[in-house]
Amino acid sequence: MASCHHGARSKTDRELYVGTVSQDTDNTNMGTLNYDTASIGFLRASTWTADPFLGTIDDVRIYDRALSTAEISALAASPPGACANSAPTLTVNEPDGTSDSVTVGDDYSIDNDLADTDNTVTVAFYYDTDSSGLDGTAISGACATAAEGTSVTCTWDTTGMTPGSYYVYGVTNDGTNPDVTDYSPGQITINAAAITAIYYSVGTDATALYSDTASASSGTLTLNSAAASKIGVGDEIRVGAGADRYYITGRNSSTEFTIQNSAANGGTPWGYEHCVCKHEHHDLPGI
């Protein structure tokens, strides 16, 4: 990290400051400072030089008097540009909305550029439903303290995420400057994990009419392939191992149905019955 060291010198008095704090004084009479023997950054006499300064010296100021403590404090409060601490830079590259689709439980790689010329910093990532406000939810794991670098990725485990589309933003801080933030240019879409649904006619568990992988949310069942006339209104759905049971109450398309809890799942019994001896499906009028 860049730092500024301030000093004051007269013919017989020298005092070194780091920031506003005096480090040491020296009252040895150094004689008159002449233009032909003065040097900056190393010791010099008329015939030799020694002890070069290790570092960078900038904004050298020469006064015709020793500065007061108050004057030195004022200089330390507003150092030259070379001594100021530069803020980190952050760009979130991905998700950019292109091929950024995963299923709940999959890993996703967040891509970003993070750099700081003065400090070692990390970035914490969040997901958000929009691209403003910085009011999202923190992402745990590796993306909570992602390291510096160009096109660096951290792995986001989407287990437990609510299906939907999200922006990602990062927040970094070097301990000196205000937070630096950036939103992703696009969204990541997190899809519901596929479930297995088995369909029975109401009133019998004897034979499954149809089985398919599907997703269910907000009262809607979506199959991964067209069901055609294999199932329909009034059939009962048993999801997974059969713990969750629902009735099909409407058909929206060949792959999408509306559903409600069955009596066995704490819902209201559905009044439409199929013949259990032979399954023939006919849509109810108006459905």
Image: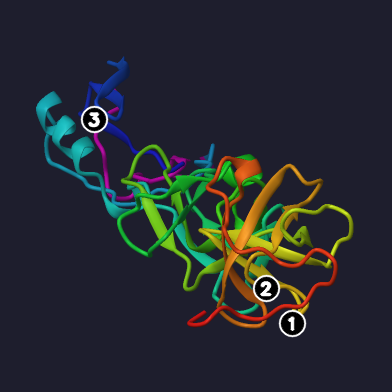
Q: Residues within 10 Å of mark 1 (few under 14, many from 20)?
A: few
Whether label 1 touches label 2, CB < 8 Å:
yes
Whether label 3 touches label 1, CB < 8 Å:
no
Q: Verify whether residue 46 appears in magenta.
A: yes
Q: Verify whether residue 160 appears in magenta.
A: no
Q: Secondary structure at mark 1?
A: loop
Q: Amino acid at mark 2?
A: Gly
Please state the extent of the stretch shown in magenta in the rendering. 29-49
Position of residue 30 in the picture relative to residue 285 (left or right): left
Q: Residues within 10 Å of mark 3 (few under 14, many from 20)?
A: some
Say the numbered circle drawn on residue 232. 2
Q: Residues within 10 Å of mark 2 (few under 14, many from 20)?
A: many
In percent of width and height, residue 141 lies at 64, 40
Regarding residue 241, the answer to whether it shows in the image is yes
Regarding residue 152, the answer to whether it shows in the image is no
Q: Secondary structure at mark 2?
A: loop
Measure the alpha-carbon separation of dots 3 and 1.
96 Å
In percent of width and height, residue 149 lies at 62, 58
Q: As rendered, which of 227 and 67 lies closer to the eye?
A: 227
